[in-house]
Structure formats: C-alpha cells, structure tokens
Image: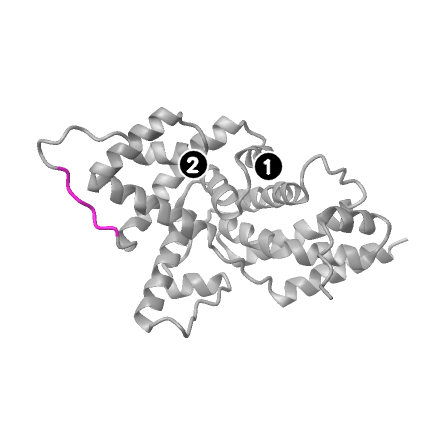
Amino acid sequence: MTDAAPASDQDLLSAARGGDAGALDALLARHQAQVYRFGLKMCRDPEDAEDVVQDTLITLARGIRDFRGESSLSTWLYSVARSHCVKKRRKSKFAPTSEASFEQDVVAEGLDVHDPARPPDEEAAGREVQAALDRAIRSLEPMYREVLVLRDVEGLSAAEVAEVLGVTVATVKSRLHRARLAVRAAVAPLLGVVPTPAPASAPACPDVLGLLSRHLEGDISASVCAEMEEHVASCPRCRGACDSLRKTLTLCRATPAAPVPDAVQRSVRAAVRDLLDAP
C-alpha cells in the first residue's frame, strides 16, 4: 500500500476557503520556510525576516477567500512578502553594526552546517563559501538582490519574477545578468577555479559570462551558443570563468530554507485562530 500523494495547493486552498482550518494550517506550514528564506535574503536582518514571514502568512490567512488563483500561490506570497520587505527597507538603513564572521552569518540564518561525513577542513571551506555567497547576495542593491533571490535561489521563472516585481521580463533578465556577475565575482576566489592569465598576443575574448547568463535564460541563438562553446573549449581563462559562474548558480539553487523560529510559528497560529474565531 502506497502513501497518498500530498494535497496540492489548489486542493488545500479550496478546503481552506470552505472553512477547513487544517487545510489552512497545512498551507501555512508548506510555504513558511520559503517566505522566511526570502525575507532573510531581502531584509538582511533575522528580526525583520520574522516580521515579514509572520505578516505574509497572516495576510494569506486573511485573504484566503479573495485569492482567485490568477497566479500561483507561491508567486502571490512572494509579492506579499516583497511588499512587507519594502516597508521594512524604508524604515532601515540596512547597515550592519559590525562585521560578522562567516560562522555567525550562517548561524544567523538558522542553517545546520555540520556534516559529520565531511572532513573538518572541507566542512569549514564549505561554510566559508556559503557565507561568502550570502554576503555577496546581501551586498547587492535591492533591485538586483530581489531578482537573483527569486530566480536563482527560489527558482521562479523570469516571467514569474516579473509578475512579483511588476516589471517586464526584459527588465528582470537585465538585472539578473548584472546580479549574477557581481555575485560570481565575489565568490569565485573561494571556488577553487584558478584564473589563467591571457597570453599577451591573444585576441580579446568575448563576454562569455554575459553570454552564459543569457544562454541560461534562452536568450542567445544556437549559432552564438556554438561559437561561445567553441571559444570556451579552446580558452582556459574563459572556461574557468564559466565554471565559476555555474558553480555560483549551483550554490544559489542549493541554498537551504532556514527553519522558521518556533515563537514566530506560534504567533502566526495564534493570529490565525483569532481570525477564524472572529464573528
């Protein structure tokens, strides 16, 4: 006997609209970690991120009957979370009072970084790379940070990111390419990709990093792609650069979701119960 497949968001939404408190609770539990991770990346402060996830989930509970499903629930939640992040941004300078170590950076997001199967030196190196990635993302201007987080960390399509942000797909892609290259530049020295200097007599290389980012979004032709691949195959310097960008994006996509603090979960559930009990 096999376990039943988990209920879809649409099934849970329909049940929650009908007054099923368990379905609403399941929706909150399913989406809280991704909203919290987004809040951490965008707000750059755990307390603000806690406020964002709490406000976003309460907005979901309050608006459950009004959500018509023109977009996916995840896309709608990111839109709501982003609006709360923007409000936080207007009240804060986002300036840290001190420079934390990479261990503090990782712990601040609630990530379990210990892996007993890895040698201590590899584990420390992995923590350092992950923390460097986090610092690089946090250092981006908000308009670049949000496209990179939504596209490369949360995995939304470019069209979905455009819907969340209220901009065109072209704008999303333009900002995304810049954000990717900035983060890659910050993380590359820790990725083990040794840069190879170009020979003095070598012709100028094409913009392989920009082309690779555009290729990942399906924005270059097959002929241009073939030319880029041919050049990279013959140019160690460009091959190393592309490898570092690929590794950076792999790290982005592997970013774990931080557990939502128990106190925040309790507060959200209490607020939801008050909503359901209200006449």
Reply yes or no: does residue 77 show up in magenta.
no
Where disc 2 sits, the SS reads helix
Instruction: List x then y, in percent, for residue 104.
Output: 41, 65
Tell me the magenta residue range.
193-198
Question: Camera-side residue: 84 or 276?
Answer: 276
Type of the residue with mark 1: Val
Q: Which residue position holds label 2?
A: 216
Q: Is residue 154 rendered to the left or right of residue 30? A: left
Callout 1–callout 2 Cβ contact below 8 Å: no
Q: Which residue is drawn at 77% across and 51% down?
A: 12
Farthest-out residue, bottom: 116
Instruction: List x then y, in percent, for residue 267.
Output: 70, 62
Q: Which residue position holds label 1?
A: 164
Residue 111 badge = none
Instruction: List x then y, in percent, for residue 138.
Output: 43, 49
Question: How far, Cα to Cα, is label 1 from label 2?
Answer: 20 Å
Q: Can residue 13 be seen in this view?
A: yes
Image: 67 above or below 133: above
Question: Camera-side residue: 138 or 223?
Answer: 223
Type of the residue with mark 2: Leu
